[in-house]
Amino acid sequence: MTAVSASLPYQLAGKRVFVAGHRGMVGSALVRRLAAEDCEILIVGREQVDLRDQAAVAGWMADQRPHAVFLAAARVGGIQANATYPADFLHDNLAIQTNVIGAAVATGVEKLLFLGSSCIYPKFAPQPIAEDALLTGPLEPTNEWYAIAKIAGLKLCQAYRRQHGADFISAMPTNLYGPGDNFDLAASHVVPALLRKAHEAKLSGAKVLPLWGTGTPRREFLHVDDAADALVHLMCRYSGESHVNVGVGEDLPILDLAEMVCRTVDLDAEIVLDPSKPDGTPRKLLDISRLRASGWRPRRSLADGLADTYRWFVEHAASGQLRL
């Protein structure tokens, strides 16, 4: 076993920092956040390097020689997308993270942060969910393919840390939302889906807003710009084998979220539940005591975050910059 020798705080200033997945919601938020760090931000589009292509990734990393990597690239989607494309979700995510992490070791990257997902935890994990709940029970079936890939990614970081002394860490964010989210109803998560449905109901004059499930599952939501700030904080101030939960430490029922969305959009409609549709995990609230102990706190309330996200959606939908 090779010991990890990490000097904290890790300095990003003057470094070449690769943001893998810069066009995604989290990746674009990281690019915005890193602009304040006096570092050189490295990005590459899929048309230049397909991160599922091992040789292409290895060649690009060897040429660019980043000092630090934020691995935010992933194939993501909601319940329907996971159910429709299980093989794609498992294969593509395994390939992306294996290629980037492996190339980071081969090219001597100083530090890497792997971005996971709170869906890695068991469906019936004790609440709030602490980091050590990982692998203590069965996963939620509606997103197990994505979850298994993410578990493999964080374990790969741990393995390289143990065997090669690589200063690779992992962060597990709660449900994220914000500018750059996916508003395609066939693949979106609950916040962008509700915002779009409420917006379209308002435009059409509809008096009913359908809501999948019973409305009782509880979820925690973190604005993506707060998430990016937490990830930069961890990159600079954390070095350890365990992954770290990233969230706000508070949750609410999905029905309450839908009501907040209606107020955000200024929609006067009845929320009609459809209990024939799946609820997913009954509750998912992260224990963020480890992150709090490091000195980090979120800045945005859910109400402010929803308003910010809705403004972004309206602006980009009106200008034709969204594929709906």
Image (spheres, rainbow, N blue to C red):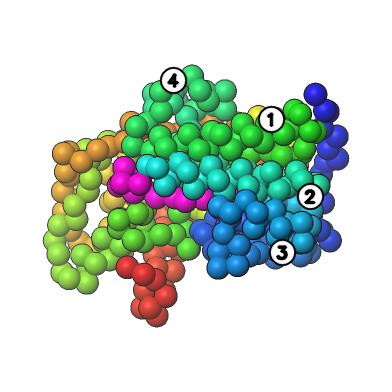
Q: Of residues 84 and 310, which is closer to you in this image?
A: 84
Helix or strand or loop: what does disc 2 sit on?
loop
Q: Residue at x 17, y 44 (%)?
A: 273
Would residue 200 appear left or right of 159 to someone viewing this image?
A: left
The label nearer to you, 2 versus 3, is 2
Q: Position of residue 176 (x, y in %)?
A: 47, 49
Mark sitting earlier along the chain (3/4): 3
Q: Which mark is residue 107?
A: 2
Q: Residue furthest front?
A: 55
Q: Residue 41 carries which label?
A: 3
- Marks 2 and 3: CB-CB under 8 Å? no
Q: Position of residue 289 (x, y in %)?
A: 60, 31
Mark sitting earlier along the chain (2/1): 2
Q: In the picture, residue 141 is in which quadrant?
A: top left
Q: Residue 84: say if magenta.
A: yes
Q: What's the amino acid at mark 1?
A: Ala
Image quadrant in which the C terminus is located? bottom left
Q: Mark 2 and mark 4: span between their CA atoms?
A: 37 Å
Helix or strand or loop: what does disc 1 sit on?
helix
Helix or strand or loop: what does disc 4 sit on?
loop
Mark sitting earlier along the chain (2/4): 2
Q: Residue 129: say if magenta.
A: no
- According to the image, label 4 marks what residue? 137
Q: In the picture, residue 284 is in which quadrant?
A: top left
Q: Mark 3 and mark 4: span between their CA atoms?
A: 39 Å
Residue segment shown in magenta: 71-85
Q: What's the amino acid at mark 2?
A: Thr
Q: What's the amino acid at mark 4?
A: Gly
Up the image or down, 206 lies above or below 71; here it is: below
Count residues near mark 2 (Cα–Cα under 10 Å), then give few for <14, some for 14-19, many for 20+: some
- According to the image, label 1 marks what residue? 159
